[in-house]
Image (cartoon, helix red, strand yellow):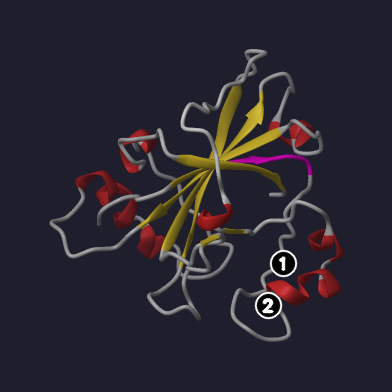
Amino acid sequence: MRALVLLLSLFLLGGQAQHVSDWTYSEGALDEAHWPQHYPACGGQRQSPINLQRTKISLPSTMRMTVADGTVYIAQQMHFHWGGASSEISGSEHTVDGIRHVIEIHIVHYNSKYKSYDIAQDAPDGLAVLAAFVEVKNYPENTYYSNFISHLANIKYPGQRTTLTGLDVQDMLPRNLQHYYTYHGSL
C-alpha cells in the first residue's frame, strides 16, 4: 500500500455523528442526498461529507494553518472508512473532484480546554479531525500498515471494534503534510 496523496485537515465543529448503519453512499433511498429526510441532524449547514473541488479552490501560496491562541487538540481515536475499488463500494467519506478513495483515515481530536471528548463534542470549537486518503497500489508491503492489517480479521461486521498496541499513527500518514484543505463542518 502506498499511503496518501492528499491530506485533509478537517476542523469539525459541533454536530454529532448519527450512529445508524442504514445509511449509504451508494445511490438510492438512503444515499447522501436523502440523509436529511431520514436523519434530521444530517440536514444542517457545513455538513460532512463534502466534495472538495480543486478547480474552485484558490489560495495564496503563503497561506499556513496556525492556531494563533495556542489551542492544543488531544487525539481521542482513529477510525477508517474503507470499501472496494468501484464507486458503489468505495470507502472514503469525502470526495475530491467527485472521486471516492478506497480508504480514508480519520484521527479525531478534542480541544484540551474541555475535560473530556464527551464534553468537547457538543462545543463549537470542541473537535478537530485530521483525515487522509489512502491509495492501494501494487507496491511491496507497507510495513507501517502491517500491524493494522493483521487485526482486520477481527472486524467483520459494522460496529465491531478491535484494539491495537504499539501502532505509530504518524507512520501511516504522508511524509509531506504541507498540502491540505481545511473546512468547518460536522462529524
Q: Majority secondary structure of the magenta segment? A: strand
Q: Residue at x 57, y 22 (%)?
A: 66
Most extreme residue toward the left is 140
Residue where numbered disc 1 is placed:
20
The residues tagged by marks 1 and 2 sit, at their Cα atoms, a distance apart of 13 Å
Residue 95 appears at what percent x and percent y? Answer: 53, 62
Q: Is residue 183 left or right of residue 47?
A: left
**Circle 2: residue type:** Asp
Q: Which comes sooner in the sequence, label 1 or label 2?
A: 1
Q: Is residue 33 magenta?
A: no
Residue 58 appears at what percent x and percent y? Answer: 55, 44
Tell which of 67 and 15 is nearer to you. 67
User: In this picture, which residue range is highlighted in magenta?
Assistant: 9-14
Q: Is residue 108 left or right of residue 137?
A: right
Residue where numbered disc 2 is placed:
31
- Give the numbered dot on residue 102: none
Secondary structure under badge 1?
A: loop
Q: Residues within 10 Å of mark 2 (few under 14, many from 20)?
A: some
